[in-house]
Image: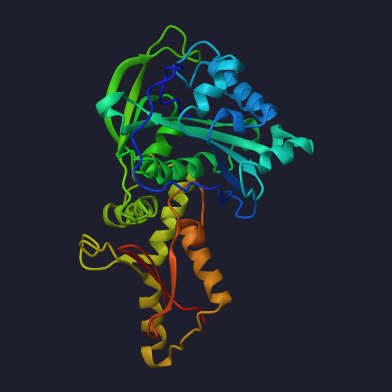
Amino acid sequence: MSEVHGDSELVPPGPDIDYPLALTPRQVILRDRVTVATLVPFASAEDVPRALMKYLSDQFNKEIEKGDTYAMSEPIPLAQFGRYWFSNFGVVMLLGDIESAEQTHSMDRAGANWTKACLGGFHIRPNYPGRSSHVCNGTFIVTDAARNKGVGRLMGEAYLEWAPRLGYTYAVFNLVYESNVASCRLWDSLGFKRIGRVPGGGQIKSQPGEFVDAIIYGRGLSLDGEDSVSQDRFEKIRYYLKHAKYPRGADRAEKSRLRSAATHYKLLGGEDGGGATGRVDGVRDAHDHRRTGATQRRRQPADTQEMGRVEKELGDCDTGDGGQGVAEDGIAWLGERGGDGVVVEDGARALHVAPSG
């Protein structure tokens, strides 16, 4: 993952929060759509079991020593790591359904193997002091036990959900090395904009004697209630259908999902796909209508089997590397609409899925 704040020293506190703050552990499903994990927020370093802290510190320093991801060149001693990671707001991602930070101490006393249970972590902190402390950044780490499981994307989504609730209005990632292709793809896919470039901003170990450019990413944060991550996924589908080319940053898995989406959905409302609503409708609805006639089409009950089918449809065309289905994307189940199939909706975005049978 990308280091987006290269200074290991503490920075001033973030913005004052004048509304109730209730950040509780967040349960997620990994890419296999079976394994449950939990993003656990910690109020301070003292709340983290020491063995877990040591493992997270070791993993972070291991990545520093590799010399290809983070701007810092020297490892952070364990005595300082806790303050660095948890002084403002720190999160650890653990396997299993965990109800509270206190539960991690019970797990530790029971002999938890953190090398298997800890999947990664991130923190959120001000990027600037004083009058600009409402602009945040963060540092992310994916552990050895969590490679290729969609952990990075799940943490990125949680970052976008929690940062505005902490009072931040904008996120800046100062230095993401262009050679770190996986991180660039992730931030591109989560709606971050490339707001700047530092030519030759990094000296990385894998390319000795050379300088690599660093990308500066920026993104607005909002508490308006709209799930901007899910919205971005719908925008990616619409972009692919409209332009017949992949969005920037799409990896092989995302390209495959977009190709799948193109066989099932079409744009409504003309070339731009429905103006402000960006509605995407089911191509197979039109095919079925021509083949059987509207009067012969039967209505399907909004039962569990149908819900599962729609989840699979959306999962197949999801444009995020987490591969999440309906529930994980916060898409509300609205049942059926007339005889034309089932509609699932997320904010102003809607997908219309043809009924089975």
* Outermost right residue: 110
In percent of width and height, residue 74 lies at 52, 10
Q: How many marks?
A: 0
Vertical side of 338 occupied by 134: above or below? above
Looking at the image, which is closer to me, 269 or 109?
A: 109
In percent of width and height, residue 211 lies at 38, 12
Q: Say left or right for 57 vs 115.
A: left
Vertical side of 283 occupied by 210: above or below? above
Q: Quadrant of residue 282?
A: bottom left
Vertical side of 86 occupied by 156: above or below? below
Residue plotted at (42% across, 19% down): 6
The colour scheme applied to this rendered structure is rainbow
Looking at the image, which is closer to me, 327 or 271?
A: 327
* Outermost bottom residue: 295
Q: Quadrant of residue 215?
A: top left
In percent of width and height, residue 351 lies at 38, 67
Q: Quadrant of residue 104?
A: top right
Looking at the image, which is closer to me, 86 or 221?
A: 86
In percent of width and height, residue 120 lies at 58, 34
Residue plotted at (56% across, 23% down): 82
Looking at the image, which is closer to me, 216 or 92?
A: 92
Q: Say left or right for 101 vs 1.
A: right
Residue plotted at (50% across, 22% down): 84
